[in-house]
Image (tube, helix red, strand yellow):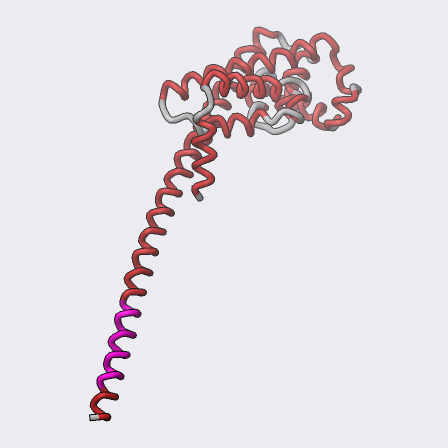
Amino acid sequence: MSFLTDALEGLAGLPQPALLAATGALTLAECTLGVGFLAPGETALLLASTTVTSVPRFLVMWLVVTVCAVAGDSIGYFLGRRFGDRLRDSRMIRKMGQQHWDNAGELLRRRGAWAVFVARFMPVVRTLVPASAGASKLEYRRFLPASIAGAACWSALHIGIGSAAGASAKYVESVFNGAMWVVLGVAAVVGAIVVLRRRKQAKTADDRQLEEVA
């Protein structure tokens, strides 16, 4: 399993500013209308979070990811504000599935600004709710607080999961390596006992042969 921790250590060895910039950019893209289907923002966040080994690193990544997620939401919102329901018939929405656009609109009608927060934790729909909110003329002063709250909770959750996964992988490998040393030690002892027993049996057979000759 050393390849796993080697990979994690290699990731942790990357320059922190570059890692944060890449994670933030992918998060922004993932949260922008439709781009989430092309940019693996959530996966990138989980991988980058395995490098989080201290509270300051957690806070910095949390801040960067939250700001980028809110920026992506805002881009989607203003695209929806600009083009309205015409987005539903766009090539991108048709490719994603117009039913997802309809689901986002229905969620907004039922939950209002609260839907922006809830949708953050829903795959597919979360990338459409900001644009749908803009198209439905939801006021930005109501949209923005819900987006910030959702992004902050979403990023904290995923960074926590990624950080715990990285620590767990290293722990599992350390346990596995320790177990391997125990197994090797037991095998060595058993091997030594078998060799000594065979030598003793061989010596006994030789002694019997000498007695018979005598």
The quadrant in which residue 120 appears is top right
**Residue 76, how many percent across, how many down?**
65, 14
Please report the residue visible at 75 percent of the width from the left and 22 percent of the height from the top: 92
Q: In front: 151, or 17?
A: 17
| Residue 143, above or below 193 | above
Does residue 174 appear left or right of residue 64 in this picture?
left
Which residue is most to the front? 214
Q: In front: 128, or 107?
A: 128
**Residue 163, how many percent across, how many down?**
42, 30
Q: Main secondary structure of the magenta part?
A: helix
Residue 204 within the magenta-colored segment of the rendering: yes
Count of numbered circles on the image:
0
| Residue 49, above or below 201 | above
The quadrant in which residue 147 appears is top right
Please report the residue visible at 58 percent of the width from the left and 15 percent of the height from the top: 113
Please report the residue visible at 50 percent of the width from the left and 21 percent of the height from the top: 19
Q: Quadrant of the N terminus?
A: top left
Residue 214 within the magenta-colored segment of the rendering: no
The quadrant in which residue 107 appears is top right
Does residue 50 appear left or right of residue 135 in this picture?
left
Q: Quadrant of the C terminus?
A: bottom left
Magenta residue span: 193-207
